[in-house]
Image (tube, helix red, strand yellow):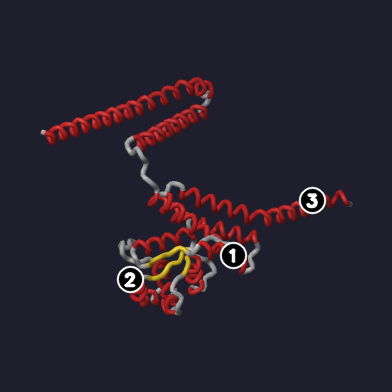
Amino acid sequence: MMAEHAPVVMTLVAAVVLEQLYMAFALPVARLLVRGWHYGYTALAAPDDRAERRLEMASDAHEYLADQLSEGYKPGQAALLLLGHVLLGAWADIVWTAAHARMPRRPVLRPMRSVRVCAVSVSGLLLGLSEARLLLSPGGWDTALSVVPVLSGLAAGAVNRAMLRRDTRALTRAAQDAVRGRERRTIGARDDTD
Amino acid sequence: VYRRADELTQLEMDILGACLGVAVRGEPELHGFAIAKRIADASRSRRLTAQGTLYQSLGRLLARGLLAARWEDAHVAADEGRPRRRYYRLTAEGQAAATATGPALAATRRPEIAGA
């Protein structure tokens, strides 16, 4: 008799334990997630903007939770509501990040790096797709395996070499500009002395 | 639907309306959450404006000079055991804009805020 009901009892006990765990940890976890989100999307902003935004968002989250709890919501429910409150405005937070993110120090090289990452990712994707096609074709397993390292190596090498050449050219141009600027300044100083 | 850059959104009009409502009652400033609460109460909605959306609009109104903001004294917040609040109040321009948007607001779905 007992053995018959054992699974039901075990399920009930597990449900109660899970509910208790959820009630105990939902609120701290939600607070942590919300704080993490605030810290994450403000990370690129200038220190003053960042500190102000984090403080204001922390204050809002605090007021929101206090309000929900005072309205009689259980901590677990309030945690979910808080996550929804923040999540529904996430797009506006991203827009804020875009408006407040600081400019990179070396604007010449940063885009090239991202171009390289994009190029390698795209070539990887294309390789993956062609390999998948080979694998799906009848008897294509062996061909696919033998081609993988060769093609991957060739593609990655070619992309890297091209990007490296571009970086080198940009650096050379920047160095030449710097030298020309220095020369111009020297000539100007000499003219002033004369 | 395209909106002119100087045109106020529905939420911005609601914010100005909420600030005007409390200013008329002699309460000069409100913090962000209180503004959201007032907007929800006035529209008899249980759902508050999402965090990011509300502060995006508040930021725009600040940038346009329709609202002014100040940070609460740190000691007051510490005594009450909560983070510092940022209080918003209408500027003279904001008051004019809120009064001007009153009729427009009355014609929309949230008439109570305009009359508050």
Question: What residue do we see at 35% from left, 27% from top?
Answer: A164
Alpha carbon of mark 2 to alpha carbon of mark 3: how far?
66 Å
Alpha carbon of mark 3 to alpha carbon of mark 1: how far?
36 Å
Judge left or right: residue A160 versus residue B45.
left
Labels 2, 1: one chain: no
Q: Kindly identify which residue carries mark 3.
A: A10
- The x and y percentages for residue B107 are 38, 76
Residue B62, quarter of picture: bottom left
Helix, strand or loop at disc 1? helix
Question: Label 3 is placed on what type of residue?
Answer: Met
**Chain identifier of the residue bearing label 1 in the image:** A
Furthest-front residue in this view: A193
Question: What residue do we see at 18% from left, 32% from top?
Answer: A186
**Chain identifier of the residue bearing label 2 in the image:** B
- The x and y percentages for residue A34 are 55, 53
Judge left or right: residue B3 versus residue B74.
left
Q: How many marks?
A: 3
Q: Return the disc, 3 or 1, that comes first in the chain's sequence.
A: 3
Helix, strand or loop at disc 2? helix
Residue B93, label in figure? 2
Say above or below: A185 vs B92.
above
Locate the C terminus of chain A by quadrant: top left
Residue A66, label in figure? 1
**Chain identifier of the residue bearing label 3 in the image:** A
A151 or A94, which is in the foreground?
A: A94
Residue depth check, mark 3 versus mark 1: number of the one nearer the observer? 1
